[in-house]
Image (cartoon, grey):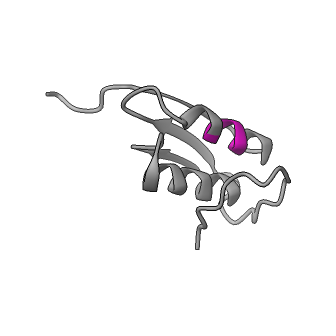
C-alpha cells in the first residue's frame, strides 16, 4: 500500500490518507523513515519521532512538499 521511495521532487501523492494524522516512531532511519515517507506520499499529516539527530528533517521536508503537514522531534515516549 505505501511505498518507501525517496522524495522525487514532484507533488505526486496518492491522496488515499488525506485528512488522516499518523505518528511514526523511529522515523529518522530505515524502516521507520520509509513508513513516514509512505504515509506522507499518501497524503497523511505525519509526526516524526526519532531518537537522535537523523535524516528525519529531510523526510519532514519531503512530506511538506507533497502538501501534507509534518513535524517531529526526539521526544521520550517511555517511562524508563
Q: At 64% across and 36% down in the image, what residue appears? A: 58
- Residue 70 x, y percent position in the rendering: 63, 36
Rendering quarter of residue 77: top left
Q: At 68% across and 52% down in the image, what residue appears? A: 19
Q: At 52% across and 48% down in the image, what residue appears? A: 22
- Residue 49 x, y percent position in the rendering: 44, 36
- Work out whether residue 43 can be spotted: yes
Count of marks placed on residues: 0
For the C terminus, the quadrant is top left
Rendering quarter of residue 3: bottom right
- The one nearer the camera, 19 or 38, is 38
On whether residue 80 falls in the magenta region, the answer is: no
- Residue 14 x, y percent position in the rendering: 75, 65
- Work out whether residue 20 can be spotted: no
For the N terminus, the quadrant is bottom right
Against 12, is 27 above or below?
above
Question: What secondary structure characterizes most of the magenta part?
Answer: helix
- The one nearer the camera, 41 or 17, is 41
Q: At 17% across and 28% down in the image, what residue appears? A: 79
> Which residue sits furthest bottom?
1
Q: Find the magenta span and give its range.
A: 59-63
Left of 37 or right of it: where is 9? Answer: right
Left of 28 or right of it: where is 44? Answer: right
- The one nearer the camera, 58 or 43, is 58
Amino acid at each position: 500500500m505505501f511505498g518507501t521511495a525517496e522524495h522525487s521532487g514532484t507533488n505526486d501523492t496518492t491522496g488515499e490518507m488525506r485528512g488522516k494524522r499518523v505518528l511514526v516512531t523511529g522515523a529518522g532511519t530505515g524502516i521507520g523513515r520509509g513508513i513516514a515517507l509512505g504515509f506522507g506520499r499518501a497524503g497523511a499529516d505525519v509526526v516524526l519521532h526519532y531518537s537522535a539527530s537523523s535524516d528525519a528533517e529531510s523526510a519532514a521536508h519531503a512530506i511538506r512538499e507533497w502538501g501534507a503537514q509534518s513535524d517531529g522531534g526526539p521526544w521520550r515516549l517511555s517511562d524508563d
